[in-house]
Amino acid sequence: MENKQKHSGLTGWRKKLHDIIFEAETPLGKTFDVTLLVLIVLSVFAVLIDSVPGIHQKYGDLLFMAEWIFTILFSIEYLLRIYTTFRPKKYIFSFYGIIDLLAILPTYLSLVLIGSQYLLVIRMLRLLRVFRVLKLARYVGASHVLAIAMKNSRHKIVVFLEVVVTMVVIMGSLMYLIEGPENGFKSIPLSIYWAIVTLTTVGYGDIAPQTFLGQLLASVIMITGYAIIAVPTGIISVEMAKAKDTPVSTQICPDCHYDYHDQDAVYCKKCGSKL
Amino acid sequence: MENKQKHSGLTGWRKKLHDIIFEAETPLGKTFDVTLLVLIVLSVFAVLIDSVPGIHQKYGDLLFMAEWIFTILFSIEYLLRIYTTFRPKKYIFSFYGIIDLLAILPTYLSLVLIGSQYLLVIRMLRLLRVFRVLKLARYVGASHVLAIAMKNSRHKIVVFLEVVVTMVVIMGSLMYLIEGPENGFKSIPLSIYWAIVTLTTVGYGDIAPQTFLGQLLASVIMITGYAIIAVPTGIISVEMAKAKDTPVSTQICPDCHYDYHDQDAVYCKKCGSKL
Amino acid sequence: MENKQKHSGLTGWRKKLHDIIFEAETPLGKTFDVTLLVLIVLSVFAVLIDSVPGIHQKYGDLLFMAEWIFTILFSIEYLLRIYTTFRPKKYIFSFYGIIDLLAILPTYLSLVLIGSQYLLVIRMLRLLRVFRVLKLARYVGASHVLAIAMKNSRHKIVVFLEVVVTMVVIMGSLMYLIEGPENGFKSIPLSIYWAIVTLTTVGYGDIAPQTFLGQLLASVIMITGYAIIAVPTGIISVEMAKAKDTPVSTQICPDCHYDYHDQDAVYCKKCGSKL
Amino acid sequence: MENKQKHSGLTGWRKKLHDIIFEAETPLGKTFDVTLLVLIVLSVFAVLIDSVPGIHQKYGDLLFMAEWIFTILFSIEYLLRIYTTFRPKKYIFSFYGIIDLLAILPTYLSLVLIGSQYLLVIRMLRLLRVFRVLKLARYVGASHVLAIAMKNSRHKIVVFLEVVVTMVVIMGSLMYLIEGPENGFKSIPLSIYWAIVTLTTVGYGDIAPQTFLGQLLASVIMITGYAIIAVPTGIISVEMAKAKDTPVSTQICPDCHYDYHDQDAVYCKKCGSKL
């Protein structure tokens, strides 16, 4: 009852705008969401190619204009979202609310700080909504399982990272002592960087041990390191096996923006609002 | 009954040809299949060595001729397959029907488009039939389990890839800002390429961060990235554990080309035709 | 009773000091522990930046002094720990007792052996206590699970390492024979180093096969090696799935320094002392 | 009874020799086995360092002599093994029988074929017996579990390798077409080698895509490849979880050389001989 009143608290066209922007049930809402996704992809693409010297020289002005048009469109959308939501503050400080803001800021910032317009790629994060917007419940469910597994393994991952950081600092320092600046290990921080590159099996090869002792220690790091680096896979596999694999609803609570509801849920399980 | 009529609808020698080409029960059918596998391996091998400059100079003409002989043989085989199958359309648009066509097209295409003959290596895909042709039920079963596990993890893999793509775009852009064109990060697309090379732990080393801040961010990408990249292994391990591990029949339905029948199946479970 | 007597065997202020240094229940004990963690981080950080040529030139004297101040502080702390513990010998030869000693030795050693002060980074190991000190039972539990999983997989890891070492020695020798010194494989030990770099998928690229046969063997090492290197992940995943995931107490037995007690434990399960 | 007769068929000192060489229960047998392990390690070590130019120049003659002494000792041991075993043929054609022969052949071969003495490192394989010889039942059990897991996953690994080989051939050919010889992709076989280096995440960097299209395809190979390459880990994890983890006996059947007996086994489960 209380929720109903709150909902009907919005006047006619404001309510309509809300349904178009936040819901994707009506044809107009669906069109709005898909258009938005296309615009986001285009605007990120524009930033990417603008950084290519050849393209920048030729189409720089055009892309600069496009950037401003996209930004103004997204700014209007952001303001409308605030205006038509039931609880503006909840939206502004929600995960997607912050991203929506960050997705327009860099253009304005680029007036003061040259180069900051490249940060516009943060708009990519808005695409994380794609499965929910397109009503693909299977994918929303899958991302839920992944999120749960990551969340449940966070304690073990933190402990693991602590051990890894301790290892690379000590190994890096040892390599600095063994190889020294004359073999490319110019300082301990750089040697630690090398140890990380080696332990994660990335192995750029810009720095590589030259002395026998250095290669011996590097071999030890690689082999024993391989056994240790297998740990995160083990952690996540186990958590993944535990996480329930059920499709969830693609609805978002209009009130508190909580977004993992069961498919048969009628009321939000966090705040009791009608979905 | 209906199926029987359809089968007997083929006249004598056409029926015989069908049994030789599509079945591997009779000695002649077995010989045909094994010969085919050998020819495919030889023809792919010819394409591979023809691309080596030294060999091309010496044996180029010979290999060119061989290529055409193989293609004509495979073309005849392809036409015979269409002619002797019960439902030509089903075969033409089936997975292996398309591959069989793609395996002969590039040679004809090379008359117009120079270089396209190298695409003949697509013939390799025909070898995927090897276990079924050689009646190795254990391997057909194993590939079935792998296929099931991959299929069941597709939603999670897509979500995972979306997150990875978002990450590399943002990380690549940040590295472009930090390192800049003077350190090899010439454009954002190239920096994204670097981020992919780093996150997947390939690490060519043709582009590598030079500044302290760049190396710091690269370290963060590598270490946290390692935890994230462990995810697909977790996903597939879990699905693999779920997939049933039973040997399946090596028979293909003559009618609808469905190919995973239980070992004691007498009728196709998809269309009811007698196997 | 016996334990009580032992505890009360410490005189007033010695008992107080013990509670500050070894316990973290009282406000003073907590402050002491947190200060210690901050000092350790700072002292390691000082060693790291002191190795950067530019910084060493400018702030070398300052950092040298800081190093001695840190070392003297940690030396006092080490002596106090010995003085205020119930069984000094147990502490001295415990895991953390040895680390606490190793964390001060390099500075004194650097008076005789130039360069050894870089080994001070071993102080990092003292940070492994961070979760226990900050009373984060979840993380202590997580590290317990990881430790158990690693411990239980040690037999399999050792067998695995034996096979890997055998493989890289044989593969390295073969590559030395195939590629030879003229292609960078200058000796068998160096070729073995290359084999380790390849098998662990690090791949620096400072040494890479140049001949066809060498690249063929390298491909075999990489592909089959990949299947084999998947083994440690399998081992650890399985052990991780078995290990119980319960938060443990952050208490350490004052008497025998055993440190994995259940959360409701009142007496040490190893020596019976009151916790 | 029959076995007893066979055993007692060996005359006194031949029986004694057998017990020393094949068993490790008596002090003499134990001494023999440990001496053998030490000699193997020393002889492999001699081969390794002999390949280092500096050492070869100085100690080449000494190491050459050592090589012959080791080989003669191992040859005598090999002949004694044949002479004192119950069924010489079974031993000669058993896994370790073949390795024992291969471990002495290269030295004799080096009289004809220069360089073949480096193959002596194959002696490393003899060390695989180390856990059995040292009666470390836990490790013998662990290697049994690993062997079982590898054996049970062989069908899936073969299918997986077939898919990987097909992929790298097609991807390599595509890259050859896109990048061409001018960017280092000199032939299709070399491009396939590059594809293997990339797919296994080794990434030497000696060959790397230069064109935009090439880097795009390389990115696709890396990202999707990463999902595919997670498969062997999944396969082995699952099989590892299934394999029973019981310590097995370190005994070898004197008759048929079968070597995985339960700890309480009195008779060989393969041939019925008394252990």
Image: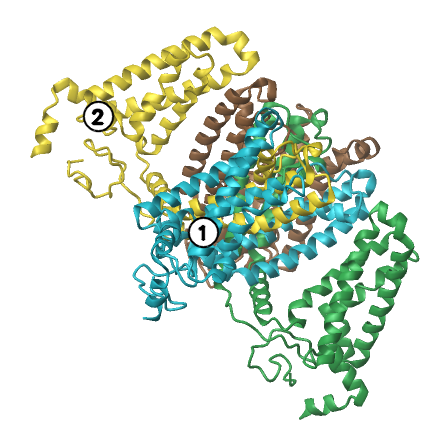
Chain colours: A brown, B green, C yellow, D cyan
Task: Tell which subunit mark 2 falls on.
Answer: C
- The quadrant the N terminus of chain C occupies is top left
Residue C6 relative to residue B24: left or right = left
Residue D68 left/right relative to D86: right
Name the side, left or right, on which B211 lies relative to D72. right
Which mark is drawn over residue B44? none
| Mark 2 secondary-structure assignment | helix
Q: Nearer the viewer, mark 2 or mark 1?
A: 1
- Residue B104 location (% of width, % of height): 83, 64
* Up-down relation of residue D232 to residue C260 (above or below): below
**Can I make out residue A258 in this image?**
no
- The foreground one among B4 and C201 is C201
**Residue tagged by mark 2?**
C89
Tell me if mark 2 has few (under 14), some (14-19) or many (20+) residues whose alpha carbon lies within 10 angstroms of its own: few
Label 1 Cα neighbours within 10 Å, binned few <14 / some 14-19 / many ≥20: some
Q: Residue at x 61, y 47 (%)?
A: C221
The residue nearer to you, when weighing A98 against A88, is A98
**Subunit under mark 1:** D
Q: Pick the quarter of the image with the C terminus of chain C.
A: top left
Which residue is at a point 76% across and 80% down the rendered structure image? B85
Please tell me which residue is depicted at 48% across the width and 63% down the height of the picture.
Answer: B242
**Gap in angstroms between the C-alphas marked 2 and 1:** 54 Å
Give, as a three-letter code, the residue at label 2: Lys
Location of residue A164 in the rendering, given as x and y in whole percent from the top left corner: 46, 34
* Label drawn at residue D80: 1
- In front: C198, or B232? C198
**What amino acid does circle 1 point to?**
Leu
Q: Position of residue C251 (x, y in %)?
A: 24, 35
Instruction: Let me know if marks 2 and 1 both belong to one chain.
Output: no
Rendered location of residue B98, percent (x, y):
76, 67
Q: Residue A158 occupies which quadrant of the picture?
A: top left
Q: Secondary structure at mark 1?
A: helix
